[in-house]
Amino acid sequence: MAQPLVKKDDDRDDEADYSPFLGIEKGAVLQEARVFNDPQLDPRRCSQVITKLLYLLNQGETFTKVEATEVFFAVTKLFQSKDIGLRRMVYVMIKELSPSADEVIIVTSSLMKDMTSKTDMYRANAIRVLCRITDGTLLTQIERYLKQAIVDKNPVVASAALVSGIHLLQTNPEIVKRWSNEVQEAVQSRAALVQFHALALLHQIRQNDRLAVNKLVSSLTKGSVRSPLAQCLLIRYTSQVIRESANTQAADRPFYDFLEGCLRHKAEMVIFEAARAITELNCVTTRELTPAITVLQLFLSSSKPVLRFAAVRTLNKVAMTHPMAVTNCNIDMESLISDQNRSIATLAITTLLKTGNESSVDRLMKQITNFMSDIADEFKIVVVEAIRSLCLKFPLKHRSLMNFLSNILREEGGFDYKKAIVDSIVILIRDIPEAKETGLLHLCEFIEDCEFTYLSTQILHFLGIEGPKTSDPSKYIRYIYNRVHLENATVRAAAVSTLAKFGAMVDTLKPRIFVLLRRCLFDNDDEVRDRATLYLNTLGGDGAVVQTGEDVKEFLFGSLDIPLVNLENSLKNYEPSEESFDIYSVPREVKTQPLAEKKAPGKKPTGLGAPPAGPPSTVDAYEKLLSSIPEFANFGKLFKSSAPVELTEAETEYAVNVVKHIFDGHVVFQYNCTNTIPEQLLENVTVIVDASEAEEFAEVASKPLRSLPYDSPGQTFVAFEKPEGTPAIGKFSNMLRFIVKEVDPSTGEAEDDGVEDEYQLEELEVVAADYILKVGVSNFRNAWESMGADCERIDEYGLGPRESLAEAVNAVIDLLGMQPCEGTEVVPNNSRSHTCLLSGVYIGNVKVLVRLQFGLDGPKDVAMKLAVRSEDESVSDAIHEIVASG
Amino acid sequence: MELCPSIKNILLLDSEGNRVAVKYYSDDWPTNSAKEAFERAVFTKTQKTNARTETEITMFDNYIVVYKFVQDLHFFVTGGENENEIILATVLQGFFDAVGLLLRGNEDKREALENLDLILLCLDEIVDGGVILESDANVIAGKVDSHSMDAGAPLSEQTITQALATAREHLTRSLLQ
């Protein structure tokens, strides 16, 4: 039979794509495997067949159970051959087939014979194969040989046994742990890799015994480790020991000298491992950091991309916590912007953006502009995000940064990239008032030529909210109305809504908007026509349904105060009938708990130096939630919501945290509760608050949670009245009270009768910082000057001995809960004095600016001069009181 | 943090991204299609870079990938995002040079496929279940091509000359074939 796929040997030279495996077929190869059963084995031919089998497996082919068993039995026959090359292939094949327990028995004796052979290569490989396929019972039989192998004079045999030990420790720890003595001996081996494998195994055996690990590290750091890999291991173990003994003073950190010494090792991998370990030390000091940064800086100009990448990636991480420490590397970093390797270039840029100061921004932007054109979108997104955080850090630079964003917005790019840019511009518009008008115009220009419907509609919606509030709303109309002519129906409908918003908000534009909306009545899309008709009627253009201005605004701008999920469910359940759908029947309670979800402690995408996510703007969501509860509706405007404070230990039966909502004359505690017991249903959940240590507070309302099923978080609220506009503080003790009902886990049904029960929670405090909003100013000096010295209060404080200047600065910032300005929260290396600028809004909407001057007085004592300016001297005094009492 | 340096996979692909030989040591890619998807991603991402003189490096999906190309062979070693890049590069260099020795300097796809047995043994000698077994190319190549060795001689003492000699012998054999 002809086999057209198999090439003959003659034409192999003509065929560029020639492969010895061309046209290979599983069935045929399995047939070929019969040669394994020949009485006269041909080692060469057998090797070739095994190679073919391995090739098939490697290409992703799978064998059925029967096929695998057949091949396995055939392969075991090959132990008869004395050919070394063939034996090697047999070993690999057995490992690939991973035979079942009853099959293993067949080869056990052959492998055990090899294990005691005189040939080292047989011994080493037989150990690896046997340990891979063995189970516990067999292991006890061969344990004696393995222990011998660990201390074998041949390093390959010893390594094979040790590495097998590392794997076996996962499945049979009690057996491997008995080998400690031999492993310990192997750690002293002169062979580099034996030492490495022995150290890895010894540490894994002892990893749960802190004292033993400590001893291991202290004896080895004295210097008997030769292999670079083993030295890297030792560095990792050492930093683990340092981490676990973190309570001691930073000054005499144990083993730091060892890490520092490793920076002078001759192997690059050790130098780097040590440098990285130092940068990752908890609360690392500048003095400790400096030598590590120095070696990393050398790596930056290495000819090897791997070294440059490793160094810049580590420095990028350091820049997040210690931007000042990295500034020395800025020149080297800038030359990396043109690196061939785009990962390195991107990391360099994002590092520079983190460490750069205000004066270098413009130069940096110029360099980045050249760079942006030739990198992939994913890198561009990283850069855009870094620029966004830079702009928030230096609001004065918004002009050049905003320009940059608008330039790249005009260039080619995919959806995710464009979305990242648009999101950034929107955030900047929100946070930097000066940037609003230019930002909006950039967005307008973008939608003139935007291929993404989603982005166009988002921008149109945003324009509708922000545009009417600008100084000259009319200039946006042209851009919006152009959409009605040129775009698809979705965008046209969005544009109609935006036009209507302008009409509702700006009376002078109203007549002109009516003209435009009337034109939309002839659109060929239903939705667009419907919207235009609706808006014309509500705005009173056709005089049909004239409503009061307030109602119109509420209708057009008011956010839908019903959770969309609930609305969706209700609509699904609604059956068309005589009765029309009643939107008020939709439940308003938020079932899920989107605001206080615990951050998963696991992997965070650190990616290419992704910047830490900014604080989510949760205030809007909280405000919506609270105003939907009638009891709290008349409390006025929400001033501030704190971050969630945990009131229970991790992994308790009920997990509760609290968010403090501060209103002018009230405080609302929002308790987010989670029931972690599947067999229980909690009902009527309330928190009993004892405010005896908070004299100025009086409880006015509480809203119980009707039911709290397993693993579906819910909220209960307690509200207090407090003197209006003052920063009343106090301590509250909390008790969770509820009715608990047993749940049958199989059916999920709860019993009818419940038992009342209580659960003690931790105390909660309302502190002065709860009354200060973090609000930045773009130019502190201007703001400070214009505030004037009328209500200035200056005093000096001794802060006593502190760990470092930076620690003292952070403590005061946390105490005041204000926004650091112009990056002054970062204390430069080795400085003995520091000035920190803070700004915020005090309850009652009083702007407050603070200038903190710190100085080191003696070795550790920190002194501080506090200057406060505000619009009200009582507020200035209050800030001083906070510091004085803190 | 993973304390022992660990290798997630070693890949040897051709200039079109097809497998020559691959070895996975991690469960991160449970199915063959997941593996193929990863290989495709790595290949497309690195395809246009010049990794012929120096080992290059990239990062994606929270993996570090070091790679080096010669002719139509693309070598890759993958590690976790917290792995020491230089350790990964050392393993890659060991693999790369060992294959160079075993193929007697004729590193191309055809030669690699014709000596696939040597390449598979090479992979087997470099990493065992993710743990680095050996990273010195001469030692690896020596262990793989031990056909001509004295049964009793310690493997580690085999020098590069010996390795080349055995390689040469191998060549003659395959020519006579």
Image (tube, rainbow, N blue to C red):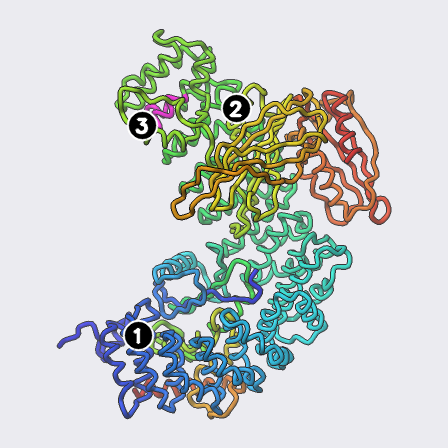
Q: Which mark is residue A68?
A: 1
Magenta stretch prevailing secondary structure: helix
Q: Residue beneath label 3, please?
A: A574
Q: Mark 3 belongs to which amino acid?
A: Tyr
Q: Who's the residue at 42% across and 80% down the image?
A: B104
Under circle 1, the secondary element is helix
Sequence-earlier tag: 1 or 3: 1
Residue A93 visible to an observer of this rendering = no
Q: Residue beneath label 2, please?
A: A627
In the image, is residue A466 above or below residue A65? above
Which chain is mark 2 on? A
Residue B47 spot, x, y in % from top left: 40, 59
A239, A349: nearer the viewer? A239
Observer-side mark, 1 or 3, equals 3
Which chain is mark 3 on? A
| Quadrant including the N terminus of chain A | bottom left
Mark 2 surroundings within 10 Å by alpha-carbon count, few (fewer than 14), some (14 through 19), many (20 or more)? some
Tell me where the magenta segment starts and ends, as one range. A481-498
Q: Residue furthest top?
A: A543
